[in-house]
């Protein structure tokens, strides 16, 4: 804590090239040049407090496992957890799928900690962009979104509004706890492991049944398969 104000920790997530680096610069950080290859932490004093921003590599909807691995690396940089998950999105795109990918990985608990930064690259009418591409923001995220001009640096008023929105959210909801994600991952991995065991057990039962049905018609085939199984490690028998 600095100067009587609580420090803020912000986790930035968004697709590659959407404008996360611009957001870091606008809030006061000095991001590394070029694309973000791994989670990077930036610290900057703003208005009597320290704002910590953790930038992340570009999100790909097709690479959920890679995203979860990245979150494992990023969340400790916000220890004990971010005050807000700042989703940086293209205002002209339909972003529901991206948001669902993030919530699926972080858990439904993350939804109430999300603040959305819409990058308005073409300076289009903001209300029209919400109505056409981002209608879910009003209800699902309780209006927690703000526009940044994509053609120029965001002005100080926009930055102040964003930080105020994050501060109010943090006062209402606290922080997104790292342990929430870790527990979700432990459960997912345990379920995935059990699913593999169940599939193996199913195929084993089907194999035994097939052998019983073929042992008279194809004795040589059954014998050769049995010989192969005997050579497998004990854990497979």
Image (cartoon, rainbow, N blue to C red):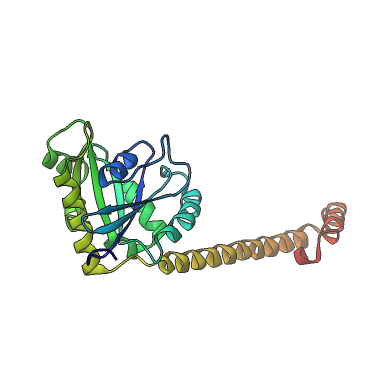
Q: Nearer the viewer, residue 52 or 123?
A: 52
Residue 9 image offset from top left, x and y in percent:
33, 59
Q: Quadrant of the C terminus?
A: bottom right
Residue 77 image offset from top left, x and y in percent:
43, 58
Q: Nearer the viewer, residue 61 or 69?
A: 69
What's the residue at 66%, 62% (across, down)? 200
Relative to 155, 82 lies left or right: right
Residue 96 image offset from top left, x and y in percent:
29, 48
Q: Residue furthest front?
A: 3
Compared with residue 121, is residue 187 higher up or lower down, i.e. above or below? Answer: below
Compared with residue 97, is residue 212 higher up or lower down, i.e. above or below? Answer: below
Q: Please tell me how many numbered marks the rendered image carries.
A: 0
Relative to 17, 155 lies left or right: left
Q: Quadrant of residue 205?
A: bottom right
What's the residue at 45%, 49% (across, down)? 39
Residue 227 image offset from top left, x and y in percent:
87, 57
């Amino acid at each position: 804590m600095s100067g009587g104000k609580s420090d803020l920790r912000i986790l930035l997530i968004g697709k590659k090239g959407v404008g996360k680096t611009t957001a870091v610069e606008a809030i006061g950080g000095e991001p590394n040049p070029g694309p973000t290859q791994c989670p990077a932490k930036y610290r900057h004093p703003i208005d009597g407090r320290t704002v910590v921003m953790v930038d992340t590599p570009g999100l790909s909807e097709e690479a959920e496992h890679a995203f979860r691995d990245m979150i494992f690396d990023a969340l400790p940089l916000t220890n004990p957890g971010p005050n807000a998950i700042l989703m940086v999105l293209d205002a002209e795109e339909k972003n529901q799928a991206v948001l669902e990918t993030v919530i699926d990985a972080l858990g439904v608990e993350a939804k109430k900690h999300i603040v959305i930064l819409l990058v308005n690259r073409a300076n289009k009418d903001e209300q029209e962009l919400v109505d056409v591409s981002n209608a879910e923001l009003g209800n699902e995220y309780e209006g927690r979104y703000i526009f940044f001009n994509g053609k120029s640096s965001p002005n100080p008023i926009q930055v102040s509004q964003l930080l105020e929105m994050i501060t109010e959210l943090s006062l209402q909801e606290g922080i997104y706890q790292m342990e929430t994600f870790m527990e979700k991952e432990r459960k997912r991995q345990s379920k995935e492991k059990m699913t593999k065991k169940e599939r193996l057990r199913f195929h084993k039962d089907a194999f035994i049944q097939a052998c019983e049905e073929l042992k008279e018609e194809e004795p040589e085939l059954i014998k050769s398969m049995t010989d192969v199984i005997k050579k497998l490690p004990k854990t497979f028998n």
